[in-house]
Image (spheres, rainbow, N blue to C red):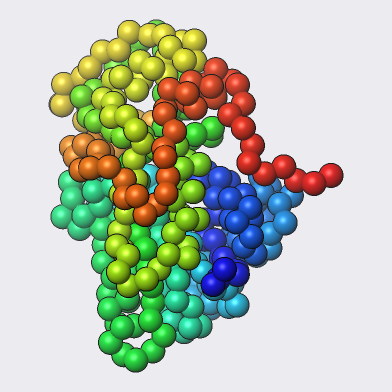
């Protein structure tokens, strides 16, 4: 292998819990940054290095990355306060942090960056989420171009744009399952919005497979999606059937959906916001098949999600030694 040590930012979350075992299986030494060590509890039994630091502080970020060969950024937030062009949480996580990562990498001479963005991210997109994700990609692209022109260590970055990601512990199907458990019916905003959900283990596999494949001829951006396309209503209906809480689904007109989102925004962890509704103005669907360079055959949603929504195990890739 050309690279040995991988630094994962955002590795204690949903995607990181699938990615880190696969990195270990591939033979990489893994280090993970976390602001509070308690957040790393799900992965602390793995043979990895856990560093308690604030990656938003440049000095702490640089110290964490020092000695790594590859950086993987998984940091992302789904909701934020409304602002133009996006809220402060989106600005901090999706825009400022990728730029800080690139700056630290260039300071340390680290070449390889893998960055998780979102399908249809665009600085002119319909939602704060998509606009901030698009701006983050632009900051990375600017850093790559600067590294190629100033005679320093070239920065090789690959951006991954997944559709909605599902798997045990996800905040998508599991959220609907929790609501369906207590609600007599489901009033649903944007019932006809379309998605191409991809299994979290397949996202992790795509990232791992692309670490070593960083030649200049390789595309810098890869879209990720599963084998099936579904409307939101179809996904909610499937979730209800699989979890044993089948409920009537009532599609809301646009004005009622936005009112629902505005009301939910006052909750601590809203199931939907107006910005989520804005994101669904663009179908989260790939324009074609996934690039064969990724070497991923995506798992069907029905098989995997059908299991964990019923409370059944879907397999564990890494089992800590006794």
- Side of 53 where 188 appears, left or right: left
Residue plotted at (34% across, 40% down) = 225
Residue plotted at (60% across, 21% down) = 312
Would you identify the image quadrant in which residue 63 lies?
bottom right
- Side of 27 where 57 appears, left or right: left
Quadrant assignment for the N terminus: bottom right
- Which is more toward the observer, 26 or 313? 26
User: As displayed, is residue 175 above or below residue 141?
Assistant: above
Counting from the top left corner in percent of width and height, residue 91 is at 33, 60
User: As displayed, is residue 153 above or below residue 111?
Assistant: below
For the image, the number of numbered tags is 0
- Side of 153 where 284 appears, left or right: left
Counting from the top left corner in percent of width and height, residue 53 is at 60, 66
Residue that protrudes farthest toward the bottom in the picture: 151
Residue plotted at (38% across, 89% down) = 152
Q: Is residue 89 visible?
A: no
Q: Is residue 66 visible?
A: yes
Residue plotted at (75% across, 46% down) = 320
Residue that protrudes farthest toward the right in the picture: 322
Quadrant assignment for the C terminus: top right
Counting from the top left corner in percent of width and height, residue 2 is at 54, 72
């Amino acid at each position: 292998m050309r690279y040995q040590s991988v630094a994962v930012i955002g590795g204690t979350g949903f995607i990181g819990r699938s990615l880190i075992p696969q990195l270990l299986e591939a033979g990489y030494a893994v280090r993970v940054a976390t602001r509070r060590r308690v957040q790393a509890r799900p992965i602390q039994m793995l043979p990895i290095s856990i560093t308690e630091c604030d990656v938003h502080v440049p000095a702490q970020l640089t110290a964490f990355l020092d000695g790594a060969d590859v950086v993987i950024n998984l940091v992302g937030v789904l909701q934020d306060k409304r602002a133009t062009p996006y809220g402060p949480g989106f600005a901090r996580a999706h825009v400022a942090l990728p730029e800080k990562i690139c700056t630290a990498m260039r300071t340390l001479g680290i070449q390889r960056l893998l960055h998780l963005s979102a399908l249809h991210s665009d600085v002119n997109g319909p939602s704060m989420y998509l606009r901030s994700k698009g701006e983050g990609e632009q900051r990375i692209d600017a850093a790559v171009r600067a590294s190629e022109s100033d005679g320093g260590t070239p920065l090789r970055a690959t951006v991954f744009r997944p559709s909605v990601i599902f798997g045990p512990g996800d905040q998508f199907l599991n959220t609907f399952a929790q609501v369906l458990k207590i609600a007599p019916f489901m009033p649903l905003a944007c019932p006809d919005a379309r998605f191409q959900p991809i299994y979290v283990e397949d996202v992790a596999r795509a990232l791992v497979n692309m670490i070593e494949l960083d030649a200049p001829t390789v595309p810098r951006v890869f879209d990720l999606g599963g084998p099936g396309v579904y409307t939101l209503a179809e996904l909610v209906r499937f979730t209800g059937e699989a979890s044993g809480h089948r409920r009537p689904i009532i599609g809301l007109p646009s004005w009622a959906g936005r009112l629902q989102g505005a009301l939910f925004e006052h909750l601590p962890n809203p199931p939907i916001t107006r910005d989520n509704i804005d994101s669904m103005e663009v179908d989260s669907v790939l324009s074609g098949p996934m690039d064969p360079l990724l070497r991923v055959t995506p798992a069907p949603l029905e098989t995997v999600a059908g299991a964990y929504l019923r409370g059944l195990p879907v397999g564990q890739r890494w089992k800590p030694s006794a």
